[in-house]
Amino acid sequence: MAKITWGFQTYPGAVDLTTSVISFSRFRGKQNYLDNYTGQNMTVTIRNNTNQSASWIVGSAIYIYGPSGQDGQVFWIQEVQYNDQVGTTTTSGSGSASTATVVLQDWMGRAGQIQLNSFTLTEELSYKQMWNQFTVASGALPADMGWSSTYAGFFSATAATYTGTIANRINLNLAGEKNGSQIYQSQELMILRPGNISGSPVTNAVTLQPSKSGSTGDTYIQYQNFKRITAGTNFLNTITITPPVVAAQTATD
């Protein structure tokens, strides 16, 4: 199995912390296609025999990166658990076997802890409503969280007075698209982009026309499986889908 070397450092500041790391684990993305994005947690076990945990401060940010800086992403420290060797009575970890377990969360996980109360959202395309209105300037996001997105989306998200977490609203808007939306983080910035394929018809795809009877600008959305309902010899040929934040969509065969 190939070995990948990962690095850890404070963010900002770039103080290297890699030598204190014993092991880490993390889960990225989502388990199934239609699952919500819940954010990702990362658990890092560090040496703490000489108070290395002093550099891992709750609320501060850590930058993890692969070879040559690839796949760089910022996580925020949520909790530190001290695993002191028996007989150790100080945070300096006088026992050589003392360690600490650091629990961190990414941008989306943090957004799940940001509660908005009666936040005014104006109607915009579903992606743009998020990155254009949930901002540092609007007071929705803290200064160390931001967006790096320009894709506006395909469907409009309605105006609303929203109460709930930022992460929940993001998932509601993405549910309105359901086009293989991609959401990922680069350093401390969250990025949204479409998972659709434009151009000539592709295999295992549903065609979306720009308007009724439209002939140009088709978009093709890939699917994992396609189910239909059969009742004797009658086939369901009209379907209406009502996404959480988009007007009802009706299609007829």
Image: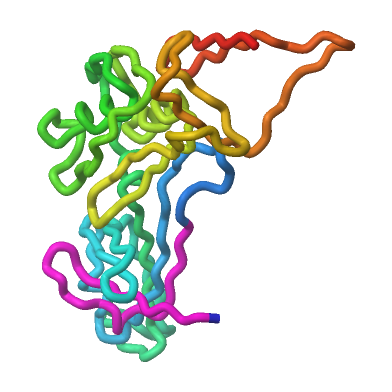
Task: Give the position of the C terminus as an image quadrant.
Answer: top right
Q: Relative to 23, is 191 on the left or the right? A: left
Picture coordinates of residue 236, whole percent (x, y): 73, 11
Picture coordinates of residue 136, whole percent (x, y): 14, 36
Q: Compared to 67, does 171 lie above or below?
A: above
Q: Nearer the viewer, residue 149 or 213?
A: 213
Q: Residue at image x 54%, y 38%? A: 35
Picture coordinates of residue 50, whole percent (x, y): 26, 85
Q: Nearer the viewer, residue 225 or 101?
A: 225
Q: Is residue 59 magenta?
A: no
Q: Quadrant of residue 92?
A: bottom left
Q: Nearer the viewer, residue 109 or 103?
A: 109
Q: Residue at image x 43%, y 34%? A: 198
Residue range in magenta is 2-27
Q: Relative to 2, is 122 on the left or the right? A: left
Q: Is residue 11 magenta?
A: yes
Q: Nearer the viewer, residue 105 or 169?
A: 169
Task: Give the position of the N terminus as an image quadrant.
Answer: bottom right
Q: Relative to 42, is 122 on the left or the right? A: left
Picture coordinates of residue 108, whole percent (x, y): 35, 44
Q: Residue at image x 39%, y 37%? A: 194
